[in-house]
Amino acid sequence: MSFNSIGTSQVSIAEMAKRGRASSRNLARLSNDHRNEILMAAAKTIESGTQKILDSNDRDCRAAEPLAASGKMSAAMLARLRLTAKGVDEMAARVRDVARLPDPLGRRLAATELDDNLVLYKETCPLGVVGIVFESRPDVVPQVASLALKSGNALILKGGAEAEHTNETLVDLWRRCVGGFSSAQVDVLQLLHTRADVMELLTLERDVDLIIPRGSREFVKFVARNSRVPVLGHGEGICHVYVDSSADVEKAIKITLDSKTQYPAACNAAETLLVHERIAQRFLPRVVGELKAAGVEIRACPKTVALLKREDVASAGDVDWATEYSDLILSIKVVTDIGEAIAHIEQYGSGHTEAIVTEDAEAAREFMEKVDAAGVFHNASTRFADGFRYGLGAELGISTSKLHARGPVGLEGLTTYKYKLFGDGHIVAEYSHGTRRFKHVATAG
C-alpha cells in the first residue's frame, strides 16, 4: 500500500499503475501548448514553494549528516542530497527548458504509399507509464516529471529514503499544480515509499511500460533480474580520460581536472586517467600537482609511482580499475600506446563516457571509432555527458544500453512509435491473388 499525496486514501501499487495509465492517456490527448502551459505553471509552483522545499531538504540533511559522519552514507551521497535556493531556481529553469523543446508527440517519422489511397504513416507516441527508482538527488523529481509530462507519460517514482521529505514535498507541489488544471491528469506523477512497493511495481507488466533504475551497478542488475517490465538504465559510470602522446598538455590538464573535480559525485566524472608513456614525463608531475591541490587522492600503476616519486601517491590494485569512486579519488595508469588504452577501457569501462585528449586527428578517429560507449569525446571533459548540456532540456538518466535509448535519455527516450494505415476498403486477398500490386513509394504524406 502507498500514500496518495493528494488526499488521504491508501491505494495499492496496481491501482496506482492503472490510474497512471488513465492519466497518461488523458495527458497525451492534450495539445503541445496545453502541456507547455502546465509545465510553465509547475515551474512557478516550484519557485513559490522554495522555502517549503528547502525546509524539507534541511530535515533530510540533518537526518543524513550523522550517517555520513559514521561512514554509513558517503560524502558524495550527502552532497547529492543537499539543496540550496539556487538549486531550486535551477529546478524551475530546467522545467521551463523542457517546455521550450519541440513537441515530441505526433512527429511523422515516415510515410509510405502502399497503393492508391492506401498510405502508411509512422508517428511518435508516448510509452505510457514509466517507473523510476533513484537515490539521493531530489532534483531528479522535477527533471523527470517535466520530461514525462511533455511527452504524455505518467511516472511512478521511488526515491531514496534519505530524501524522503524533499521528494514528498516536490511531488505534492507538482500534483497540486497539475490537478489545478484537471483532475484527469493528476496521477501523471505518483510516489512510492518502500522497497516492497518497488518489488510490486516490477511485476506489473500490463500497466507499466518501462522501469528506469538509477543507482549502483548491483542495484540496476537486481532490478533487471527481478522485473517483468522492460528495464532501461546504467549501473556504474567508470569513465576514462586518455591523454595521447600528441596531446596539448595545457588542454589535457584542464580536461582532466574538470572531468574529475567539477562534480566528482556524478556518474560522468572520470575515475581513471590513462597516459601515453611518451608524454607521461611532461604531463604527470604537473597534472598530479594540480589534482593534489584540488584534494584528489591518487592511486597509480607502478610506472606512475616510479615516475612521480611522491609519498602521497598510493599504489593502485586491480580493484581500482573497476571502481566507480564517485569521490575525489583518481586512478592513473601509464600505457604504451593507444591500443593499450582502448584495451583497458574495453576491459574496465562501463560503456558510459570516454574521452581522448590529442592533437593527432588519426589517433582521435581511431579512438572515436573503436571505443564502445554511449559517449566518446575528443578534447572535451567527460562531464559534458548530460541531457541538459546536450540540449535535451533535462534527462531521465544515462543509459549504457544499446536498445531503445543510449546516453542521456530525454524526450525521445520516452516515446515510441505506432503505424497508422489509411485505406479505402483495401483487403490483402487482392494482393495475394495478384489483382493488385503494392507501390511502396515513400511520400511526404
Image (cartoon, rainbow, N blue to C red):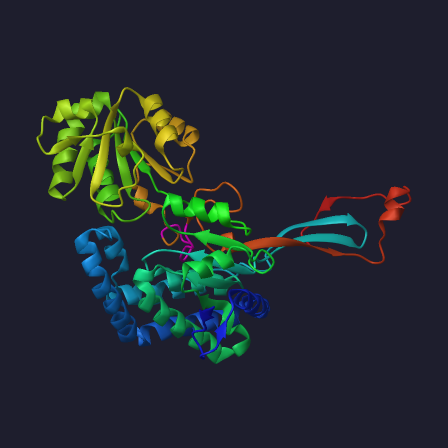
The front one of 122 and 351 is 351
Residue drawn 48% across the image and 77% down it? 9
Asked whether residue 393 is drawn in magenta, I would say: yes
| Residue 153 rendering spot, x and y as whole percentages | 53, 62
**Quarter of the picture holding the C terminus:** bottom right
The residue lying at 32 percent from left, 76 percent from top is 48
Q: How many marks?
A: 0
Q: What secondary structure is the magenta-colored segment mainly? A: loop
Residue 286 lies, in percent from the top left, at 13, 33
Residue 144 image position (x, y, % from top left) = 42, 60
Q: Magenta includes 333? A: no
Find residue 94 and report its image quarter: bottom left
Q: Nearer the viewer, residue 254 or 406?
A: 406
Dividing the picture into quadrants, the one containing residue 272 is top left
Residue 258 seen from this side: yes
Q: Nearer the viewer, residue 192 or 189?
A: 192
Which quarter of the picture shows residue 367? top left
Q: Which residues are magenta?
A: 389-397
Classify 198 as above or below 231.
Answer: below
Q: Is residue 431 above or below residue 104?
A: above
Residue at screen point 48% across, 46% down: 224
**Which residue is found at the position 27% from the left and 63% from the top?**
87
Q: Is residue 138 visible?
A: no
